[in-house]
Amino acid sequence: MKKILLTLTVACSGLFATAQQDYQFTHYMFDNLSFNPGYAGITKSICGTALFREQWAQFTGNPRTGLVNVHAPVQFLRGGLGLTYVNDQLGFEKNNIVRLAYSYHLGLGAGDLGIGVSAGIIQKSIQANWITPDGTPWGDDASIASNNGSDLVPDINFGVFYRTNQLYMGISATHLGQFDMDQLNLQNVHHYWVTAGYKYQINPDWVLRPSILAKTDAKSTQIDLNVNVLFRDMVWAGVSYRLSDAIAPMLGYQTKIGDGLLRIGYAYDVTTSQLSGYSKGSHDIMLNYCFSLEKPPVIQKSKNPRFL
């Protein structure tokens, strides 16, 4: 009974207020596209990513999020294109998000700068059996539009992303325009994202990869810190810390398949917040594949007659 009441409290706190946090993934370093359109095509490869997260496992009405995105460089557009689809469920709330992104690329120093914009739609629906503790019929509460409802609004996002062989950093804003969902008495508020990461070659076998993601809706802020090490360009292990929420060990494996690179990762979030007494932790799974259509340069060799 406590789990059910707590789930209802958590769900309602984000439904009928102007502040709300977007979906989250522990494998955020493999998902820059969904929150920063400047990332589209900047890796110079065609990439597809699938993510799935089950938060607070075995918790009634727990959040479940699935994401699929693909992006690629497009030379005649002087940049890249990307497409993202997100399905996010929390209790009686369901969200579907589709975004098409374009990023304009230009060389800057040792790397590339992507300036991007994405546009799409957000569809939100609610199917609930409302219960009022004081016995007041839910129909008499003006903040509850109906027992079931659905609405759809535009979604516009902007981002800037910079990348070199060792470093990346980005800043972006999502849900520009703060479109109202009148049918649900809800407004999609602006979210602001900042991310950065670095690859440090310790020796020929080991690469250290720290990174950070911060997001805020100007009323609440969430920060993820991650550090992992890649061994022989094949296996990685590390840990993430989400402030006041979770500690997440992670493992991953990557291998070449054809002309591309396949990556598989798993993370388990150990809840450290007040929900730790109810939650069985969170599962975060990542699948990524990237390949390039550009052929490697042909190395031409010639002999000097002096050494024939």
Image (cartoon, rainbow, N blue to C red):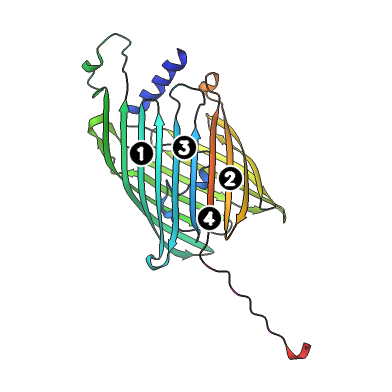
Is label 4 in a helix, a strand or a loop?
Answer: strand
Inspect this view and state whether residue 17 appears: no
Say whether marks 1 and 4 touch (CB < 8 Å). no
Name the one closer to the observer, 57 or 24.
Answer: 57
Q: Which residues are magenta?
A: 298-302
Which corner quadrant holds the C terminus?
A: bottom right
Left or right of 91? Residue 297 is: right
Label 2 vs 1, first from the N-terminus: 1
Q: Is residue 217 magenta?
A: no
The residue indicated by pointer 1 is 96
Query: Pointer 3: what residue?
Result: 24
Q: Amino acid at mark 2?
A: Ile
Q: Which residue is mark 4?
A: 290
How crowded pointer 4 is (Cα within 10 Å; few <14, some 14-19, many 20+) is rated as many
Question: Which secondary structure lies at badge 3?
Answer: loop
Type of residue at label 1? Asn
